Image: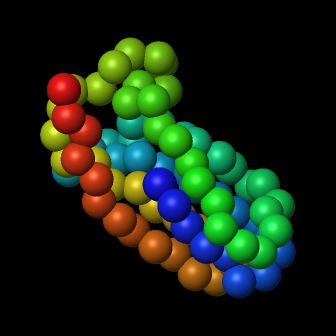
Amino acid sequence: MMYWLVKWQILNFALIMNVMGQNKASLAEAQWKPEGPHAVRWDGRDAAGRAVVPGAYYYVLDAGNRRAVKGMIRGW
C-alpha cells in the first residue's frame, strides 16, 4: 500500500478490517514519518498470525487531522 505525506507527522496505519468491520490486523501505530512517499506491506495475516480468508478488506490511514479509507482484495 503506497501513500504520500506532505510533512512530518504522526502516522497511524492501524486498521485492516473485513467487510463486516472486524479489525484483523495493525500495521503501524503512532510513528513519526517524514514527508514523501512511503509503502506498507501486509502479509495477509491477522493479529494472531493466522492467514485471513481471501476477500475484500479495508485499511484506515490516519495522518495528522486526515483520514483515508481504501479497499483492497486479498486473493488466493
Above-or-below relation of 64 to 22? below
Residue at 47% across, 54% down:
1
Q: Is 36 drawn above or below residue 21 in the view shown?
A: below
Q: Does any portion of residue 17 appear in the rendered image? A: yes
Q: So how many labels did they put on this image?
A: 0
Percent coordinates x, y for residue 35 in the rendering: 77, 75
Q: Quadrant of the C terminus?
A: top left
Q: Residue at x 59, y 54 (%)?
A: 39
Above or below: residue 16 compared with residue 48: below
Residue with the most extreme front position: 37
Residue at screen point 78% across, 55% down: 31
Residue that appears at 45% across and 30% down = 43
Rendering coords of residue 51 (x, y %): 34, 20
Left or right side of 25 for 66: right
Q: Residue 11, image x and y in percent?
A: 69, 63
* In the depicted structure, whether residue 4 falls above or below residue 60: below
Task: Give residue 26's quadrant in the image.
Answer: top right
Left or right: 35 with respect to 56? right
- Is residue 46 visible in the rendered structure shown here? no
Residue 33, position in %: x, y? 79, 63
Viewer-proximal residue among 47 and 39 = 39
Q: Quadrant of residue 46?
A: top left
